[in-house]
Image: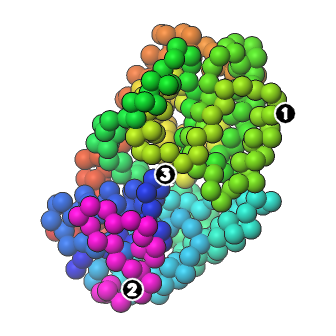
Amino acid sequence: MKIVTLLSVFARGDAVSNDALAIHRFLTERGYSTLMAAEKAYYQPEGIQIVSAKSLSFIEPDDVVIYHLSTGTELNYLFGRTDCKKIIRYHNVTPPEYFYGYSNFKVATAQEGLRGAAFLADKADLCVCVSEFNRDNLVEMGYHCPMVVVPILIPFADYKHEPDLNLMRQLEDGNKNIIFTGRIVPNKRQEDLIKIFYYYQRYYDANAKLHLVGNYTGFESYYQKLIDYVDKLQVKNINFTGHVSFAQILSYYNAADLFLCMSDHEGFCVPLVEAMQFGVPIIAKDTTAISSTLGKSGFLIKESPPQVVAGIMYKILNDKKLSKQIVMGERERLTDFDHEKIGQRWLETLKEYFIIE
């Protein structure tokens, strides 16, 4: 018996790929027979060979396969028809309506992802969801197998690497740095961040900077819409970084004074945990999985006018006692995502449901 980690696409900087790799490494380091496979692997991580998942002939009936479900792919059906012990690691599928008018390909992929998730509803032996929101999503789709919630396994040691020092010097110029990290995609509502920042600059701090840290490949039309919106509002100091290196991401977190998230749809939202790791106070809109990731930490808001959110930003950025209180709450919440603790939950789950040694 071996434990197989299976996913559609393995790529750098991708939350699903990082979770899959971290789980695989955790189990391998504890002596289990493991294998990792992907339909497409854009790189080979050090010490691990990722095999092709175009055929699943390497899977035996007594193997435990952890399938990371997040998108539309033929692998959903191939996995469902393979004789093995099946775990679905559900990361969520972004609803296709967010992509209408921006990417026909992404619309089709999301629609296929939902069809694939529905196909697998009666095929799984166990679902391990990254959030309560995702678990509820599967129940709505008709899943009846046992379900547990185990957050994404985050290798926090990576965040101790050195940031880009040149970028750090540029960012630390005495002005406030507000950041959001995540792909430039419609469900993350970067236009709401721009509108809020417009009011923040207008009423409170004309020199503050907003850094939208993320790649916009595949959503160039949405990116252009945001650029046009910035021009229309005549708002200054908004930085669209595009693709950045990991060292540069570390620089933005190190220099950040506030993390602002107005995303409409998240299956987990790893950047919230990253902001906690760097002691950055968080303001986030209470949607989908955001509240289950933050727990009682950060500053959660319901739908609010941008002027109101701008005022909350000013209060947190200028009230040291409040800011410290928020960061302390985030540090406490961060302990729930401890790498060893989450890894042990995986071991306990595997032992309970599949009687592994």
Residue 131 disc label: 3
Label 3: how many residues lie within 10 Å, few (<14), some (14-19) or many (20+)?
many
**Magenta-span inclusion, residue 48:** yes
Which one is closest to the eye, mark 1 or mark 3?
A: 1
Q: Residue furthest front?
A: 166
The residues colored magenta run 38-61
Residue 231 location (% of width, % of height): 80, 34
Which one is closest to the eye, mark 2 or mark 1?
A: 1
- Element type at marker 2? loop
Q: Name the residue type under label 3.
A: Ser
Looking at the picture, does residue 247 appear above or below residue 67?
A: above
Q: Earlier in the sequence, mark 2 or mark 1?
A: 2
Spatial CA span between label 2 and label 3:
28 Å
Looking at the picture, does residue 77 appear above or below residue 308?
A: below
Q: Are marks 1 and 3 in contact (CB under 8 Å)?
A: no
Q: Earlier in the sequence, mark 2 or mark 3?
A: 2
Q: Are marks 2 and 3 in contact (CB under 8 Å)?
A: no
Q: Is residue 288 visible?
A: no
Label 2: how many residues lie within 10 Å, few (<14), some (14-19) or many (20+)?
some
Q: Which residue is mark 1?
A: 232
